[in-house]
Image (tube, grey):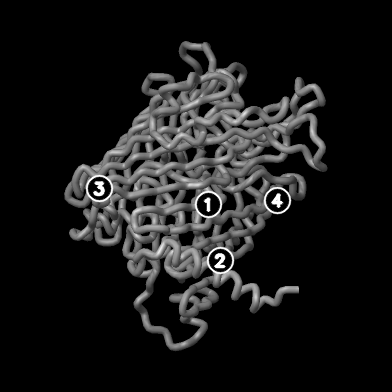
Amino acid sequence: MISSRRLFGMSKSLLVLISLVFAVSVSAQRYLPLEMYYTNSAYNQLKYHSDSTYFNSHISLKPILDSRVNEAEVYNDEGTYYYWITQKLFKEHFLVFEGEDFWCAVDPILDLEAGTNFSADSLSLLYWNTRGARVQAKFFNTVAFNTVVFENQIFVPEYEGNYYDAHGEFFSNPAATVYTQNNAVIPGFSRTKPFKTTGYDFNMAEGNLSWVPSQHLNIQLGNGKHFVGDGYRSLLLSDFAPNYPFVKFQTDLWKGRIQYTTINAIHQNLYRIPLHTTPEATYERKLGAYHYLDFAVNRSLNIGVFEGSLFQRVDSSGTQPLDPMFFNPVIGLNSAVKTQNFEFNSILGLNARLNLFGTFFYTQLVFDQGKVGGYQIGVRGADAILLGLSTQFEYNKVNSNTYLSEYNRMNYSHFNLPLAHPLTAGFQELVFRMNYSNGRWFINNHMVFNQRIAVDSINTGNDILMNQTSNNGSFATKNVFFNKLEVGYRFNKKYNLQAFAGMIHRREYGFNVQPETNYLYFGIRTRLQNKYRDF
C-alpha cells in the first residue's frame, strides 16, 4: 500500500512537472462564490477604483475570477483579535494548511433556518437543515481547486413545495408512453427524496479544478453553474438550475479589452430511460455549448454577445450520435448552420453595461428563432443616498414560447428547470432590491412584482416542461407580489458566516391563485450560493 506521505510526494512531483512545462508568471485563479454579497463587491470595486483595468471590467460572466478583483477588500477583516476563537470566528478560515508551494482552507457549510408560516392553517415548524464543508486549495500558483459537499432536510411554505413538486422527475412505463412524476427538484440545488411526508431530503456536491497555463488563459473543469449578465435575473444563462458537469476555456485578448469564454456542459432531462441495465434507470441527456464574447469599449462601457446551444445526446430510445458542432468554439456558428428541431435548440443574446458616474445601467436582449424573445433593463448603484446603502431596479419581459422547442426535451432547461429566468416565458416583472450595511450589521429588502399567465389547462407557451405552442390570444393572468426582508450580522467574510432573521410575504391576485404566505424565520448560515424563493 502506498503511504500518504509517498502519495503526496508523487502528487507534488506531478504538479512540479506541470508547472515547469508551462512556466510563466501567473497566479492560480480561484472564483468568487456566486452569492450576491460577493458579486456585489466586484461592482463596488469598479465604482470606486479609478485605476480599474479592462481586465477588471469583465465581471458579467459569473462566477468571477478572483484575479479580477482586489481579494483583500472582498475577504479580509482588518480588526484585531486577541484570542484563537475570535480569530477563527471573525477573521480566518476555519482550518488552514500552508506550505511553500501550497495553501488549503476548510470551512463549514451551514444553513440552519427555522420558522413558521403565519398564514397557514396550522403553525407547523418549517426549516432548512444544511450541513457540509468546503475545501479550497492552491498549488504552485498555477493550479487551484474548490469542492463543496452538503446534505439537507427541509420543510418549506406551500408555494415553494408546489413549485418543487411541479418540476420533479418523470418515470415511464416500458413503452415510454405514460409518465408519472415524483421526487421534486429544488432550484439551484438538486432533485429530492420524500422526507417525513411533506419534507424534502437531498444532497449536493460541486467542485472545480482551475488551471492557468498562461496569464491570458484559464481552463476550468468542474461541476457547477454559471450566470451571464449584470442584473438580478439573467435572460441568457442563470444559476437557477442545479449544477452540471462542464469544461470552460476563458481567454483575454487585446490588452484585456476582449474576454472570450466557451463552456461545454452536460445537461439532463429528468425523464428516466425505460430500458436500462443499471440498478437505477438513468436520465435522458443533452449537451450544452455556451459562447460569450465580452468587449470593453472603454473603461465605462462593456458589450457582450452570447450564444447558447443544446444538442440531443440521450433520449427515451437510447444514446444518439454525438454532433461534432458541440465542440465548435466560434460564437454564432452553431445557430447559423443548424436548424432548430428535435435534435437542436439555441438562443442568441446581447448584454451591455454602462458605468456612469458610479451608477451602473445594464440591459439584455434574448433572440429566439430570429425574433426578440425578451429584454431586460436595469440600474444599480451604491452610496448615492446613504453610505453603505445600495439599490437596484430591474424590469424583465419575456414573450411566450421563448426558450421552448417543438420537442419539449430540447427546451432551454436542465433538471426540469429553466436555464434562464425562473418563470420561463409569458411574463413581465419588476424587481427592487435594497441592501444596507454598517460594520457587520446588514439589512436587505428584496421586492418582486410580476404578471404571468395563469392558465394551466392548456399549453400557453410559458412552461419549461411543455413544447412550443401555436395557441395565441389573450389568456387569464395573475399578479404575484413577493417581499423578503432580512436583518443580520455577518461574523466572517471568508465564508459569509452570518446570523439572520427575516420575513417573506407573498400574495397572488387574479386567476388561479395560491394561498397567501407570511413566513417568519431566523437562523445561522454560511451563504456561498444564491437560494431563490421568489418564483
Q: Which residue is drawn at 49% across and 76% down?
A: 89
The answer to the question of whether label 4 and label 3 lie on touching residues, with beta carbons closer than 8 A, is no
Mark 1: amino acid:
Leu
Alpha-carbon distance for marks 1 and 3?
Answer: 25 Å
Give the mark nearest the N terminus, 4 or 1: 4
> What residue would you read off at disc 3?
254
Marker disc for residue 201: 4
x, y percent for residue 501: 50, 60
The answer to the question of whether label 1 and label 3 lie on touching residues, with beta carbons closer than 8 A, is no
Give the mark nearest the N terminus, 1 or 3: 1
Mark 3: amino acid:
Trp
Q: Residue furthest bottom?
A: 82
Marker disc for residue 181: none
The answer to the question of whether label 2 and label 4 lie on touching residues, with beta carbons closer than 8 A, is no
Q: Residues within 10 Å of mark 4 (few under 14, many from 20)?
A: some
Closer-to-camera residue (67/457): 67
Alpha-carbon distance for marks 4 and 3?
Answer: 49 Å
Q: How crowded is mark 1: few (under 14 residues within 10 Å), some or many (20 or more)?
A: some
x, y percent for residue 59: 34, 50
Q: In this view, does 436 lie to the left or right of 112?
A: left
Mark 4: amino acid:
Asp
Give the mark nearest the N terminus, 2 or 4: 2
Q: Which type of secondary structure does the marked residue at label 1 adopt?
A: strand
> What residue would you read off at disc 1?
221
The answer to the question of whether label 3 and label 2 lie on touching residues, with beta carbons closer than 8 A, is no
Q: Residue at x 46, y 57 (%)?
A: 33
Marker disc for residue 135: 2
